[in-house]
């Protein structure tokens, strides 16, 4: 373990999901071409025991919503050996994937690609280790962490925080074995008590909610599935070519340079590309199922639009949910085996790690174009963030779309700053 200040690392990454895996690969490719004195040292800390990408939502048949070309590397280095295409070749599925005639692999396949890339990169990762604080040290930054054997400290010239997103539950909801967020759906269903009501309720109207509804309806053939949401119906995702330009790497330059009012307007205009919207094919499939049940007279799927959950009361055998129709005011109480909240996520608050080194809450203008965080006072090193930059860098902030480019930009910033530092010291 690196626990003495004589071993200062160029980059310590906090969190090791796809974003910092992309950074690790960018560093690996940089080091292959760099002279020994220009190589970058890196290490990462990750609270999970191993690399994993949303394992609780790898539902059968669910597909990616981005092209396979938006993998960890292709947009930055089209000839990289870490590309999804090279993964297919290595797995012996290149011809099969081509014959499949799709840009969108299943999530299970993309998860396997990420694990393949992780193994291939061989990054220095401290698993089962949680970063607890980042503070200024004597000429470097200190990352205090808690690992399997106790506290450790890593020393870095730069820190890249990729804290990911946190589950957001409605106010007043306490997670339990019968009420839980969709993020770890498969785990929660496995731990749930044996169903006695043969009824589930899903809260939310986005892609995840629709996928959960479809999965529960197919997996529990005797159970009713109720979906409660405030909209009248699902809103189709806008994946048209012009709208998708907001995810282009080049769009980040213009977005970051714009004033805050215009950035907010663009986010509002194009929220249907990412938030509270559903793939049209899935909307049609769920409607097909519901209509078929109307014809057969045996209802199991209930879409409760323009409605809300007014109250919940959980006991050992069920959750009693009072559903209110927002148009009529009528209410209905349902006893269900579980309530699944597909109610989105919130970005990690950097002040939890950095304390008073940053302003608490969501970052607004406190992130440079190179993803360097503006701190409340000068530090001995730089802090970068991968995530939480939607208001400054656009909708790609928390998505896979721009990982390849963003990782390269952060690395370029670190390399350039080091070159300046070396020139001054010389």
Image (tube, rainbow, N blue to C red):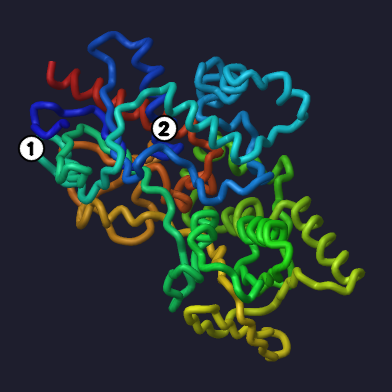
Q: Position of residue 233 (x, y in %)?
A: 74, 68
Q: Give the Cα separation between the discs numbered 1 and 2.
A: 28 Å
Q: Position of residue 137 (x, y in %)?
A: 11, 41
The circle drawn on residue 21 is 2
Image quadrant in which you'd find residue 277: bottom right
What residue is rendered at 55% in x and 23% in y?
83
What residue is rendered at 54% in x and 84% in y?
311
Q: Position of residue 356 (x, y in %)?
A: 20, 57
Task: Categorize mark 2 by other alpha carbons within 10 Å: few (<14), some (14-19), many (20+).
Answer: many
Q: Can you say whether 412 is above or below 319 in the image? A: above
The circle drawn on residue 90 is none
At numbered mark 1, what does the secondary structure look like: helix, strand or loop? loop
Q: Nearer the viewer, residue 369 or 219?
A: 219
Asked if residue 255 can be seen in this view, the reply is no
Residue 129 located left or right of residue 252:
left
Q: Nearer the viewer, residue 270 or 80?
A: 80
Task: Categorize mark 1 by other alpha carbons within 10 Å: few (<14), some (14-19), many (20+).
Answer: few
Q: Can you say whether 327 is above or below 139 in the image? A: below
Asked if residue 332 can be seen in this view, the reply is yes
Give the position of the N terminus as an image quadrant. top left
Q: Can you say whether 413 is above or below 339 in the image? A: above
What residue is rendered at 65% in x and 46% in y?
60
What residue is rendered at 15% in x and 45% in y?
150
Lower position in the chain sequence, tag 1 or tag 2: 2
At numbered mark 2, what does the secondary structure look like: helix, strand or loop? helix
Residue for badge 1: 138
């Amino acid at each position: 373990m690196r626990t003495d200040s004589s071993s200062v690392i160029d980059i310590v990454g906090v969190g090791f999901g796809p974003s910092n895996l992309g950074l690790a690969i960018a560093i690996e490719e940089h080091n292959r071409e760099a002279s020994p004195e220009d190589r970058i040292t890196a290490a990462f800390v990750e609270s999970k025991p191993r690399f994993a990408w949303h394992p609780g939502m790898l539902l059968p048949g669910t597909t990616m919503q981005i092209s396979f070309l938006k993998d960890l590397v292709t947009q930055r280095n089209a000839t990289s050996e870490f590309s999804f295409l090279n993964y297919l070749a290595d797995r012996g599925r290149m011809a099969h994937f081509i014959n499949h005639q799709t840009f969108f692999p299943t999530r299970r396949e993309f998860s396997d690609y990420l694990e393949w890339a992780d193994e291939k990169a061989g990054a220095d990762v401290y698993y089962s280790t949680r970063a607890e604080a980042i503070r200024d040290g004597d000429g470097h930054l200190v990352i205090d962490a808690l690992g399997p054997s106790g506290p450790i400290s890593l020393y870095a010239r730069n820190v890249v925080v990729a804290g990911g997103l946190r589950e957001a539950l409605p106010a007043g909801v306490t997670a339990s074995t019968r009420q839980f967020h969709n993020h770890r759906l498969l785990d929660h269903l496995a731990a749930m008590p044996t169903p006695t009501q043969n009824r589930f309720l899903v809260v939310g109207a986005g892609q995840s909610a629709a996928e959960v509804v479809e999965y529960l309806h197919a997996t529990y053939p005797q159970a009713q599935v109720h979906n409660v949401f405030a909209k009248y119906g699902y809103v189709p995702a806008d994946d048209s070519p012009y709208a998708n330009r907001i995810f282009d790497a080049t769009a980040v330059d213009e977005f970051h340079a714009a004033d805050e009012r215009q950035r907010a307007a663009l986010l509002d205009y194009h929220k249907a590309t990412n938030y509270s919207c559903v793939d049209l094919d899935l909307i049609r499939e769920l409607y097909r199922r519901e209509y078929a049940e109307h014809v057969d007279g045996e209802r199991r799927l209930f879409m409760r639009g323009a409605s809300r959950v007014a109250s919940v009361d959980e006991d050992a055998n069920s959750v009693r949910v009072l559903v209110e129709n927002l148009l009529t005011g009528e209410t209905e109480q349902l006893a269900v085996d579980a309530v699944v909240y597909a109610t989105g996520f919130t970005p990690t608050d950097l002040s939890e790690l950095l304390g008073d080194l940053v302003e608490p809450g969501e970052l607004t203008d406190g992130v440079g174009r190179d993803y360097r965080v503006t701190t409340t006072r000068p530090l001995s090193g730089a802090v970068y963030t991968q995530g939480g930059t939607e208001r400054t860098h656009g909708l790609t902030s928390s998505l896979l779309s721009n990982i390849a480019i963003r990782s390269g930009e952060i690395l370029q910033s670190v390399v350039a700053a080091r070159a300046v530092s070396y020139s001054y010291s010389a």
